[in-house]
Image (cartoon, rainbow, N blue to C red):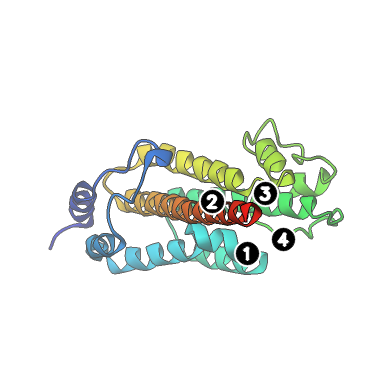
Amino acid sequence: MIGSNYKYAMLMTSLPAHPPSLFSANQTPISKIRLEKHLTLLDERDAKDLSLIEELLFWSQVNEATDQFIIYKSKEVLNKVQDEFLRGVILWRLELRTLLSALRMHHAGIKQPKKNTFNGVGRWLGDIERNWDKNDFGLGHRVSWILPAQQMLSQHRTYELEKLLLGVVWQYYANECNQHYFDFPAVVIYVLRWDVIYRWTLYRADEAVRRFDKLVDDGLQDFKLSV
């Protein structure tokens, strides 16, 4: 029987490398169908853990789900995933989501939450509650992206904000992948990085369509004005 270490080394070496720069990517390095085929090499327990992590951390899920769902799902996943490295990755991503949720609430003019009432996950909950009157919740010196994100949010620069956050997540995953190369955590990081590239290429395509539609609308407007 082939051991997990050998199988996962074979799996990782069979996958195409991710690009060094997220924003230079025009497509994912491997299709979703081909990636799923490679992932059939995972042991049953690891395949279940990866599925749980995907359901929680894939970009569309973690950004668009409700706070209540994220909190419920995060408890389930953290209880089931035993690997400490992966638990740290999960918590980091949920903390980013918690801070972004707080920024959006603050921007919407929601009043300061009472102690131990803010819905979120991770180490920043106390700072958020104590420093609600500050644009960065007093975390600007510890979380480098939070002030730029707050400014983009206040200026309704949604494209720039999403690009900033994609870059932050991409860089974090890129740093973490240096700790694991041929094991299950390495596979998980590879899949999470694949999802970030997928989100970026999808977002670029959506932006291209919107820009084209705007150009058409502007052209029609010019035509109407000239008739």
The earlier-in-sequence mark between 3 and 1 is 1
Residue 99: which numbered mark, if any? 3
Q: CA distance from mark 2 to mark 1?
A: 42 Å
The kind of residue on which mark 3 rests is Leu
Per the image, label 1 sits on a secondary structure element best described as: helix
Residue ID for mark 4: 119
Q: Residues within 10 Å of mark 1 (few under 14, many from 20)?
A: some
Q: Residues within 10 Å of mark 3 (few under 14, many from 20)?
A: many
Residue 71: which numbered mark, if any? 1
Residue ID for mark 2: 215
Per the image, label 2 sits on a secondary structure element best described as: helix
The residue positioned 54% from the left and 68% from the top of the image is 76
The earlier-in-sequence mark between 2 and 3 is 3
The kind of residue on which mark 2 rests is Leu
In the displayed structure, 70 sits above or below 133; it is below
**Number of the front mark, 3 or 1:** 3
The earlier-in-sequence mark between 4 and 2 is 4
In this view, which residue lies farthest toward the left? 1
The residue positioned 82% from the left and 43% from the top of the image is 131
Q: Is residue 148 left or right of residue 118?
A: left
Q: CA distance from mark 4 to mark 2?
A: 42 Å
Q: Position of residue 168 (x, y in %)?
A: 53, 41
**Number of the front mark, 2 or 3:** 2
Q: Position of residue 193 (x, y in %)?
A: 40, 49
Q: CA distance from mark 4 to mark 1?
A: 8 Å
